């Protein structure tokens, strides 16, 4: 498991993943990354495999430009309602303020959650950063209906839903 370095304040994402028990060498997918490369760069600190996925080809082209050649991030253009992974193949799936965008792009949150449940390993973790408490409560309910255990974490100005398979 990744540990914190003395004197360095970890980000809330890193702290959340460590507390959730994400092992080093984990295989992690970020869904709905858009053009935000910061989340993937932070996920690389776990020394595992980092994959990012977005439904927009245009967004992913911009993502590649921002990321550059140096980072070992695997970029995929795909629909989160049909994830291109085998059953039980991922340790963690992260939605960094992305869930609210799924219906905007014509998707169904229920279908996405079912797909995430399918591809997560036993004890795998879904982490969803949320904009507001009502959204977090709705997300936690959706995760529970799909078979996850779920909890909401509120710390300072951050709001996260953790679902464990």
Image (tube, rainbow, N blue to C red):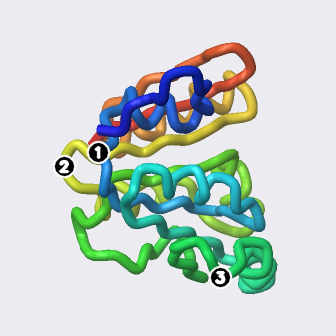
Check disc 2 and report its element: helix, strand or loop. strand
Between circles 1 and 3, the one closer to the viewer is 3
Residue 36, quarter of the rendered image:
bottom right
Residue at the front extreme, as displayed: 6
- Mark 2 vs mark 1, CA separation in Å: 13 Å
- Crowdedness of circle 1 by 10 Å Cα count: few (<14), some, many (20+)? some
Which residue is found at the position 51% from the left and 77% from the top? 74
Q: Position of residue 47 (x, y in %)?
A: 39, 57
Q: Against 80, is 125 above or below?
A: above
Between circles 2 and 1, the one closer to the viewer is 1
Mark drawn on residue 23: 1
Q: Position of residue 110 (x, y in %)?
A: 49, 54
Residue 22, quarter of the rendered image:
top left
- Mark 1 vs mark 3, CA separation in Å: 26 Å
- Seen from the viewer's position, the closer of residues 81 and 126 is 126
- Crowdedness of circle 2 by 10 Å Cα count: few (<14), some, many (20+)? some
- Crowdedness of circle 3 by 10 Å Cα count: few (<14), some, many (20+)? few
Which residue is found at the position 55% from the left and 80% from the top? 76
Mark drawn on residue 3: none
- Mark 3 vs mark 2, CA separation in Å: 33 Å
140 vs 19, left or right, is right
Check disc 3 and report its element: helix, strand or loop. loop
140 vs 114, left or right, is right
Question: Can you say which quadrant of the picture contains the C terminus?
Answer: top left
Q: Position of residue 90 (x, y in %)?
A: 31, 61
Name the residue that disc number 3 marks. 69
Name the residue that disc number 2 marks. 122
Q: Position of residue 10 (x, y in %)?
A: 58, 30
Looking at marks 1 and 3 on the same chain, the residue that comes earlier in the sequence is marked by 1
Numbered label tally: 3
Q: Against 111, is 131 above or below?
A: above
């Amino acid at each position: 498991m990744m540990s914190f370095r003395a004197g360095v304040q970890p980000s809330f994402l890193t702290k959340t993943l460590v507390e959730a028990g994400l092992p080093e060498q984990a295989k992690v997918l970020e869904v709905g990354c858009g053009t935000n490369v910061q989340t993937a760069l932070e996920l690389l600190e776990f020394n595992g495999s980092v994959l990012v996925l977005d439904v927009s080809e245009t967004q992913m082209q911009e993502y590649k430009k921002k990321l550059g050649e140096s980072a070992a991030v695997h970029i995929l253009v795909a629909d989160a309602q049909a994830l291109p992974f085998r059953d039980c193949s991922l340790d963690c799936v992260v939605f960094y303020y992305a869930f609210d965008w799924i219906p905007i792009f014509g998707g169904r949150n229920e279908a996405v959650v079912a797909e995430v449940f399918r591809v997560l390993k036993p004890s795998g973790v879904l982490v969803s950063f949320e904009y507001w408490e009502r959204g977090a409560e709705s997300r936690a309910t959706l995760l529970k209906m799909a078979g996850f255990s779920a909890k909401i974490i509120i710390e300072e100005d951050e709001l996260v839903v953790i679902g464990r398979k």
